[in-house]
Amino acid sequence: MKEKITRINRTLFELETGIVIFGLVCQVFVFGFKDKAGYSLGLWLGIGIAMFSAFHMWWSLDRALELPEKAAVRSMSTHNILRYTLIAAALAFTAITGVADPLAEFLGIMGLKASAYIHFITRKISTLIYGEEILPPLIEEPAGGQDR
């Protein structure tokens, strides 16, 4: 399993790990509500959407980096609009059908944002799995104003 995990982009792994941790913490508080099933379903639908969104952001950014500047901007804009439309459609579907709680679903989607804030925790988990990140040495540039 470690081999499968290490093939995944490290930053994406950290972001999705944070989303799951956020979901687990929120799930503890769901037990205080009357409609546990509705809130839980909404929360985990939102967590799933957040994880898909994180993957889609990584995938679209990875593709756009290989394109010329104007095409990259167009591609990223198109994918952002697509992602936001799908999120809005999922929230609207949940609100209209009443299958789950849309506010809990929105909370789960916000796990994407919360994951960025708990990066210091997910970095430790990533280091346990991947090992220390070895970065190339910085290139030192000569101090400004010196002519060669």
Image (spheres, grey):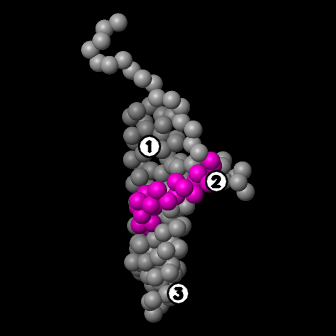
Q: Amino acid at mark 2?
A: Ile
Real-space Cα separation, disc 1 to disc 2, in angstroms:
33 Å
- Judged left or right of residue 96, residue 12 is right
Report crowding for label 2: few under 14, some 14 to 19, many 20 or more residues within 10 A (C-alpha): some
Q: Does 17 lie within the magenta span?
A: no
Q: Does 117 lie within the magenta span?
A: yes
Q: Amino acid at mark 3?
A: Ala
Q: Amino acid at mark 1?
A: Ser
Closer to the camera in the image, 51 or 17: 17
Instruction: Tell me residue 41's x, y (percent).
Output: 52, 80
Of all residues, the one furthest to the bottom in this rendering is 34
- Judged left or right of residue 110, residue 21 is right
Seen at 39% across and 34% down, the residue is 70
Q: Which mark is residue 129?
A: 2
Closer to the camera in the image, 24 or 146: 146
Tell which circle, 2 or 3, labels the residue nearer the N-terminal end: 3
Seen at 54% across and 55% down, the residue is 124
Q: Which mark is residue 37?
A: 3
Q: Nearer the viewer, mark 1 or mark 2?
A: 2
Q: Which residue is mark 1?
A: 75
Which image quarter is the C terminus in? top left
Report crowding for label 1: few under 14, some 14 to 19, many 20 or more residues within 10 A (C-alpha): some
The kind of secondary structure element at disc 3 is: helix
